[in-house]
Image (spheres, grey):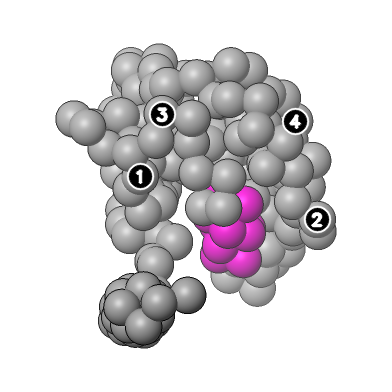
Amino acid sequence: MSKDSKTQLKTLIKKLIYEVLDEAERETIVDKKEIQLNPPNTFESYLKQNVGVSFTNEERVASTVPNIRTPFSRTQFEIRYKSTEDILNGGKMEKINKTTVVKKIRSGNLLAYKSFTLIEPTQKPESPDPKKPEPIKVTIITSDSFTNIKGDTQLLPDFLQKINDAGNIGL
């Protein structure tokens, strides 16, 4: 190998090393918010407004993460988890149902994974006005963005693990 080629190779390697060292750690979760859905809006009608982009076969495989509940159902556009948990509420044990739906959403040229979690008690509280339905609380968590329409098979399992650790899938 010529001296000039070695110098070019060394320069390229140095540039790559500095690029990797300067690269910021990727944030798996970039946003978390809670919204209120007022009747007649329902969780399902809200999800229909956020259709999303279809998951690839590689993403479906990547969504099977060890130590996370197996999805309740998978379709082309969503991965759905359901669970029931016991929580302590005002000194009483209460059961809650969780439904978490994960979708791949497009915003302009960017894509991101979003989880939509509905938490509801298994026994409905006594409402002062039984004719007036209560608002529904939904937690929405958004992953870091990506540009490849085929998805990000490294980000998806990390995102599922993070939302599971945050208590949204319920394991």
Residue placed under numbered mark 3 in the picture:
149
Residue at coordinates 44% horizontally, 41% vertically from top-left?
Answer: 113
Can residue 120 be seen at all in this image of the molecule? no
Question: Of the residues tagged 3 and 2, which is closer to the observer?
Answer: 3
The answer to whether mark 4 and mark 1 are in CB contact below 8 A is no
Label 4 vs 3, first from the N-terminus: 4
- Kindly state the secondary structure of the residue where label 1 is placed: strand
- Crowding at label 4, few (<14), some or many (≥20) Cα neighbours within 10 Å? few
Give yes or no for contact between labels 1 and 2 (Cβ–Cβ under 8 Å). no
Mark 2 belongs to which amino acid? Pro
- Rounded to the nearest angstrom, the CA distance separating label 3 from label 1 is 8 Å
Question: If you read the primary sequence from the N terminus, does the residue marked by circle 4 or circle 2 appear first?
Answer: 2
Q: Is residue 75 left or right of residue 163?
A: right
The residue indicated by pointer 4 is: 72
Number of disc labels: 4
Crowd rating for badge 2 (residues with CA inside 10 Å; few <14, some 14–19, many 20+): few
Cα gap from disc 1 to disc 2, whole angstroms: 24 Å
Label 2 secondary element: loop
- Are dots 4 and 2 in contact, CB under 8 Å? no
Res. 50 visible in picture: yes
Q: Which residue is mark 1?
A: 146
Mark 3 neighbour class, 10 Å CA radius: few under 14, some 14 to 19, many 20 or more: some
Give the Cα distance between marks 4 and 2. Answer: 15 Å
- Answer with mark 1 or mark 2, whichever residue precedes in sequence: 2
Magenta segment boundaries in residue numbering: 156-168
Closer to the eye: label 1 or 2? 1
Question: Residue 112 placed where, x, y %?
Answer: 37, 41
Upstream in sequence: badge 3 or badge 2: 2
